[in-house]
Image: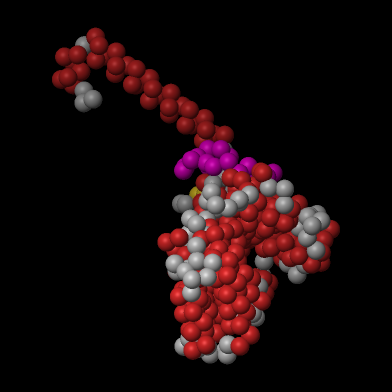
Amino acid sequence: MVTSAVSEEIGRIESSSDSASDKSAAYSALLSNIFQSSTAESISDNLKAFLDSLLGETVGIVSSRPLLITFVDSLKKHNDTTLHVEVGQHALHLLQSRVVSFAEQDAQVRDMVASGYELAGEHSAAAKVLQGTQLDSSQRTVTDDDKIRVWIRIMRNYLEEDDTTNAEIYLNRAKGLLYKCQDQELNLLFQLSQARILDARWKFLEACQVYHNLSFSTAVVEEERLRALSSAIVCAVLAPAGPQRSRTLARLYKDDRAMQVGEHGILEKIFLDRLLEPEEVDGFAANLAPHQLAPTADGSTVLAKAVIEHNLLAASRVYEDIGFERLGELLGVSANKAEEYAAHMIQQGRLSGHIDQIEGYVFFTSGSGGEASGEKIAVGQSDRQSRPELRRWDQNVQSVTEEVERITAQLQTLFPEFVAKHLKI
């Protein structure tokens, strides 16, 4: 409730016939008095009453602009984030219809309110407040760096809520102006946010590349560089097995700093194509983020799928051929599931070999260690790539069918009645 002293002083200022400068001085004195004498219970209502009067018709826009800046600066010095949010939201409501005239003041209030929400852990609310910031107003000068700073802040708040959809919108906006940005801190924040979005989208190889690049930045302290390297290794482990991941793992394994992070053990086993034991996988999973343990379309997790594909690739280094039942035991899945994984990897060009469904065996191509080129293979094409006799058979069959088609076309041209009577085209 507004105290009587504040209410009376507001009434006196509003009804007085003083000049605009005198009223501005009176409002400044009242604001100081509110912060000095208001109790914790009355300060919020007193400040709201002050705003209602200031943004009314008592003083003009020219006089109220500096007073509003003073108001925001004074409120920020009052160490109460709940008060910042409550009074700031009231100010934003009053400025909503007049934001064109108070663009700079509106931006400062939004910054204060967003900071309050961030400290309270309400990141989605903070992002929504910042979204209303006027970045293209003619009433305030906004540099490209300022725009990028606001967009990155919005993006990071959405990422705290695991809302990658909205975060990516502002990532793309910032990306369009980033080439103009000379601020090293903003560039680093952008790269970190980009890596987190790629990670959350399960684009692990791309996220790994960004994290690894960040780990070399001299603008980042050593502890944070090692954390970025750790995140890069995690993403590499979770990435689909294949030639591209193998190259990424080699680059990480050869990094001298890799031995300083906790993920070095699993990195070494995967790089050396050794089978991963369940205990090792469980220990690695304990440090993963929730989205990295989310279920995939087939019900398994990203980690489980990555481990199965790695162990399948590791098995191809040891075996020339293996039955579905035995392969399923190695991978910890059923024989049918083992066949599905093998077929999928062969079809995607991530595993070199062929499947004999009649015999129930997977044959790995010798000399390649089981790893393929990474080029996608059409369904049914994997056997033909690895067995020359099947390719020759295909060519012969194609030649015969083309010859039959050519003869049929000639018959239709020379003897149409015969064709109509004796052949079904």
- Residue that extends furthest to the front in the rendered view of this protein: 17
Q: Quadrant of residue 211?
A: bottom right
Q: Is residue 368 magenta?
A: yes
- Locate residue 70, reporting x and y percent: 62, 69
Residue 421 seen by the camera: yes
| Nearer to us in this view, 380 or 266 | 266
Q: Residue at x 60, y 64 (%)?
A: 66
Q: Residue at x 66, y 43 (%)?
A: 179
What is the chief secondary structure element of the magenta stretch? Answer: loop
| Nearer to us in this view, 156 or 79 | 79
- Locate residue 204, reporting x and y percent: 61, 56
- Please determine whether, in this image, residue 1 is positioned above or below residue 380: below
| Nearer to us in this view, 328 or 371 | 371
- In the rendered structure, the answer to whether residue 370 lies left or right of residue 259 reads left
| Nearer to us in this view, 205 or 97 | 97
Residue bounds of the magenta highlight: 366-386
- Please determine whether, in this image, residue 73 is positioned above or below residue 209: below
Q: Residue at x 80, y 63 (%)?
A: 221
- Locate residue 121, reporting x and y percent: 57, 76
